[in-house]
Amino acid sequence: MSRVAELPPPAPLPEGADGPMRAHTATCFGCGPDNPAGLHLAFVRYGDVVRATTTLPPEHEGAPGLAHGGIVASILDDMSGAIPRALGQRAVTAKLEVDFAAPVVIGRPLDAQAWLESFDGRKIRIVTRLLDGDTVVATGRALFLTVPREHFAPRDEATPPTVGA
């Protein structure tokens, strides 16, 4: 059985309006509209699933004509980050697992999807997948941990933020 068939269905998100969602920040690498090197993912909520489309340019190439695996992982990580926002939570990635199912071809439209698996205490478990047409090219499972507002406050570069266990 393929790992694609093992993905759990979406858990319900709180009631909220379908439609476009805000970026994490204007300069976020994944979804920030003001980051010239970014992926420019635009999150759209459809019930319990958040989606975004993207087409990767040659600058994101790894092997000839194919996307770099780190870029694919970045897409799934950023999509995962849309789920805490839909939950009204501030959270950070604690763990990300990516399964690469097929090559991701540069220049082809991709459909990225994310949904909640579970939310318990500080732990938010999220499922993602990336499709090229009807073909699932990558799937992801993420664990995000909620953090206080202060985690994202400006800080001295010598003082890294802490996530905690």
Image (tube, rainbow, N blue to C red):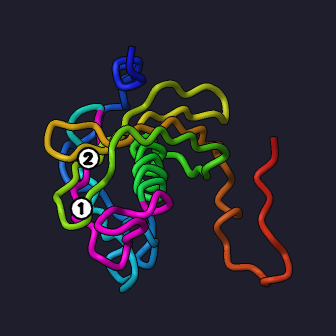
Q: Which residue is mark 2?
A: 51
Q: Quadrant of residue 127?
A: top left
Please state the horizontal and vertical placement of residue 41, each as a whole percent of the image. Answer: 30, 63
Q: Residue at x 38, y 20 (%)?
A: 2
Q: Position of residue 71 (x, y in %)?
A: 44, 62
Say whether residue 60 is magenta: yes
What residue span does the magenta drawing correspond to? Answer: 49-71
Amino acid found under the numbered disc labelled 2: Arg
SS of the residue under disc 2: strand
Q: Would residue 81 be found to the left or right of residue 92 on screen? A: left
Q: Is residue 145 left or right of residue 125?
A: right
Q: Quadrant of residue 161 in the image?
A: bottom right
- Kindly identify which numbered label has been placed on residue 54: 1
Quadrant position of the C terminus in the picture: top right
Up/down of 145 relative to 55, above or below: above
Label 2 neighbourhood size at 10 Å, few (<14), some (14-19), many (20+)? many
The secondary structure type at the circle numbered 1 is: strand
Label 2 – label 1 distance at C-alpha = 10 Å
